[in-house]
Image (cartoon, rainbow, N blue to C red):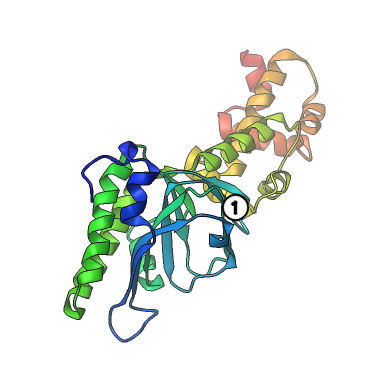
C-alpha cells in the first residue's frame, strides 16, 4: 500500500490497488464457525446493494468512499458516507443500499457469530449497527486492513489461527475509533425536542412511533447519548415544567396535575417530591 494518507488519495489512486480484492478463508473444518474473510469491494452501482438479508455470522464494512443507506427494523434509513462503520449483526435482517454514482468502496471483515458475541460480552465490540469512524482513524485503519488482507491471501493453513485473532484485534481497534453516527445523535436530539414540546405525558413507545422508528433502537440510542432513559428524561422535563408553573400562577395542584398529564394531584405530588425533595406546596412557598 502507498504510504500516502487516505485523505490524499483520489479515486484513481485507490482503485488499481483495492478494486474488489478479497480473501475468503476458513479456520478449522466448520465453514460457519471458522469463517474468516476480508477485503476491499468496489460497487459502481446499486446492483451491489443488499436487500433484506440476514447473516448467520458477523460481518462489517467501513465505507471508504461513496454514499448509501442502512436500515433494519429498528433503524430507519441511516445515511452512510465515507467513514461509516456498518455492522451486519448476526440474525438481524437488514438492508444496505448503494448510491449508484460509481464511488462506493468498502473494506469488510467477517468472523463467526460466536467470536463477535464473545468480544461484545467483554466490552470490546458494540451492538450498534451503524457508527462513524473518527476523522483521522482511516489513516490508521487502512494500512492494517491492507496488511491483514495480504497476509490472508498468502497464508498457509497453520497461519490462519493467528490471522483470525489479528482480524478480531482489528475489529476491536475500529470499534474503539468509532462513535455514534450523526443520524443517531440527530434522533436523540429530535426525541428530546418532542418530549419538551409535549404538554402532557409521552411514553417511549409513543415517541418512537412519532419518529417512525423501532422503540428498542430509540431506547438504546437515547440511553447511550443522554445517559438516562427516555422515561427519566420525560419526568425531568415535566418536573421542571411544574416548577415554572408553580412560580408563575396560583393554579390548584389538582388543575396543575391535569395540565402536566398526571392522572391526579397525589401522583403529581409524589413524583415531584421524589425528584426535588420537597412537595409542590413547599416549593411554591419557598419561592
- Picture coordinates of residue 285, whole percent (x, y): 66, 15
252 vs 24, left or right, is: right
Residue at 49% over, 70% down? 55
Toward the bottom, the furthest residue is: 29
Q: Nearer the viewer, residue 110 or 82?
A: 82
Residue at 29% over, 52% down? 173
Q: Which of 179 and 24 is in front in this view?
A: 24
- Picture coordinates of residue 12, whole percent (x, y): 37, 45
Q: Nearer the viewer, residue 48 or 272?
A: 48
Number of residue marks: 1
- Picture coordinates of residue 251, whole percent (x, y): 80, 20
Residue 13 appears in the rendering: yes
233 vs 146, left or right, is: right
- Picture coordinates of residue 8, whole percent (x, y): 31, 36
Q: What element carries label 1?
A: loop
255 vs 243, left or right, is: right
Q: Nearer the viewer, residue 28 or 69?
A: 69
* Vertical placement of residue 269 versus 75, above or below: above
Residue 235 appears in the rendering: no
* Vertical placement of residue 144 versus 199, above or below: below
Give residue 72's quadrant in the image. Answer: bottom right
For disc 1, the neighbor class at 10 Å (few under 14, some 14 to 19, many from 20) is many
* Vertical placement of residue 32 versus 37, above or below: below
Give residue 18's quadrant in the image. Answer: bottom left
Quarter of the figure with the C terminus: top right
Residue at 68% over, 25% down? 241
71 vs 39, left or right, is: right
Residue at mark 1: 75
Amino acid at each position: 500500500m502507498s504510504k500516502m494518507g487516505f485523505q490524499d488519495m483520489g479515486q484513481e489512486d485507490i482503485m488499481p490497488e483495492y478494486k474488489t480484492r478479497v480473501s475468503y478463508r476458513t479456520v478449522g473444518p466448520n465453514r460457519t464457525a471458522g469463517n474468516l474473510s476480508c477485503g476491499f469491494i468496489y460497487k459502481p452501482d446499486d446492483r451491489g446493494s443488499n436487500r433484506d438479508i440476514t447473516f448467520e455470522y458477523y460481518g462489517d464494512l467501513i465505507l471508504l468512499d461513496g454514499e448509501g443507506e442502512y436500515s433494519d427494523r429498528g433503524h430507519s434509513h441511516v445515511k452512510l458516507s465515507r467513514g461509516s462503520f456498518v455492522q451486519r449483526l448476526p440474525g438481524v435482517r437488514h438492508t444496505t443500499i448503494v448510491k449508484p454514482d460509481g464511488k462506493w468502496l468498502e473494506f469488510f471483515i467477517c468472523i463467526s457469530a460466536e467470536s463477535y458475541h464473545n468480544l461484545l460480552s467483554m466490552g470490546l465490540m458494540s451492538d450498534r449497527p451503524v457508527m462513524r469512524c473518527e476523522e483521522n482513524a482511516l489513516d490508521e485503519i487502512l494500512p492494517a486492513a491492507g496488511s491483514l488482507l495480504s497476509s490472508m491471501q498468502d497464508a498457509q493453513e497453520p497461519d490462519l489461527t493467528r490471522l483470525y485473532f489479528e482480524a478480531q484485534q482489528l475489529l476491536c481497534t475500529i470499534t474503539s475509533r468509532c462513535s455514534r453516527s450523526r443520524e443517531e445523535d440527530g434522533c436523540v436530539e429530535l426525541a428530546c425536542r418532542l418530549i419538551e414540546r409535549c404538554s402532557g405525558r409521552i411514553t417511549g413507545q409513543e415517541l418512537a412511533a412519532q419518529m417512525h422508528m423501532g422503540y428498542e433502537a430509540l431506547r438504546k440510542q437515547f440511553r447511550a447519548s443522554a445517559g438516562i432513559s427516555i422515561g427519566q428524561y420525560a419526568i425531568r422535563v415535566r418536573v421542571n415544567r411544574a416548577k415554572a408553573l408553580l412560580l408563575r400562577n396560583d393554579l390548584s395542584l389538582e388543575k396543575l396535575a391535569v395540565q402536566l398529564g398526571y392522572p391526579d394531584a397525589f401522583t403529581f405530588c409524589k413524583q415531584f417530591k421524589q425528584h426535588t425533595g420537597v412537595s409542590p406546596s413547599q416549593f411554591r412557598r419557598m419561592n
